[in-house]
Image (cartoon, rainbow, N blue to C red):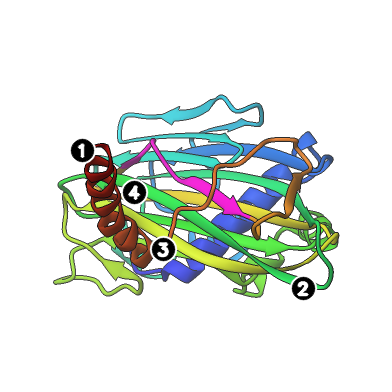
Amino acid sequence: MSFTIQRLSACLFAALLWLGAGTAFAQSAAGVVSFTGVKSSSVPQQDYDNGIIEFDQNALVLDGGIASSSITSSSARAQTRLGVNRIEVSNNAPVDNEALRASSIGGPFSAAVSGWYDTFTITGGTGAGTARISSSVTGQFGNGFGATGMYMLFKVTPTNLAGLLEDPLSPLLDDALPQALLALEQNVIDTSRFTESGELLAPGSDFGGRLVGELDFVYGQPFVLLSVMAGFANDFGSLSSFNSALFGITAPEGKALLTGSGYQYAAAVPEPATLLLMALALPLLAWRVRRHRG
């Protein structure tokens, strides 16, 4: 795995948009898409340079069901619901071409992409405001080297999304992604042989974390949130993250949060400092209640 995580993220983001373009995913205020692909060999250099990957087997699901692909050396699963991304990848064969590992994508390999988007509007105020957002990402890396996991949450305007769906390869060709509000990039590689950007973890490590942040908005002005989770495995790597990512959003107190899908999202997870205060306050509150009752 010598290609950078940023390049992989751009490839996966472009693939998600390309898969959604021209489908119901792109023709409504909200949508979900799950994609898996497995390949029994490395990607030829010319194909990689042209942004082409011919999978031995792949699956695309747009209705919230499970996408699944499997061959002897590799397997992948993905599932998407509004507010929930799930992926799983596994590989059990060494890369067949070290030269292509260095300049393209070394295979056999498996890939999984889960993405959803929804249109949000916050009302009840005027001018600009700030909302809290969070994503709880959990999973487990296997005991072998060769796995990558990433999560990104993007904020775009409806016009931006329409433009990306019309020209989905633009993030790949420009090596640029929309600004991510929340981002996580972790991988397990043999650092004695390879170098890689992003957070490096040991085999068998937990994957994920609690991502918290804020987004700026204008009252009454719609915005789109696009949530993307992806996994990749070659050599003897694997990653299971089928219980996350779980998204939450909280509008300012007393304000209304409307969605294009009509789905009611969970509240954002509090900041760690807020959780600490809650942990300290609850025992005190319980003591005061008991004292009062006594």
Classify 147 as above or below 181.
above
Residue at image x 26%, y 37%?
A: 293
Q: Split into 4 quadrants, where in the image is the N terminus?
A: bottom left
Mark 3 or mark 2: name the one nearer the start of the chain: 2
Give the amino acid type for the residue marked by disc 3 in the picture: Glu
Circle 2 or circle 1, nearest the eye: 1
Q: CA distance from mark 3 to mark 4?
A: 32 Å
Residue under pointer 2 = 128
Task: Determine whether the residue tagged by mark 4 lies in a helix, strand or loop.
Answer: strand
Mark 3 or mark 1: name the one nearer the start of the chain: 3
Mark 1 or mark 4: name the one nearer the start of the chain: 4
Task: For residue 6, say whether it is visible.
Answer: yes
Residue under pointer 4 = 233
Range drawn in magenta: 240-250
Q: Residue 229, image x and y in percent? A: 49, 50
Q: CA distance from mark 2 to mark 1?
A: 49 Å
Q: Are marks 1 and 4 in contact (CB under 8 Å)?
A: no
Q: Quadrant of residue 238?
A: top left
Q: Viewer-proximal residue, 1 or 208?
A: 208
Residue at image x 42%, y 67%?
A: 5
Q: CA distance from mark 2 to mark 4?
A: 42 Å
Task: Determine whether the residue tagged by mark 1 lies in a helix, strand or loop.
Answer: loop
Residue under pointer 3 = 271
Relative to 97, 212 lies left or right: right
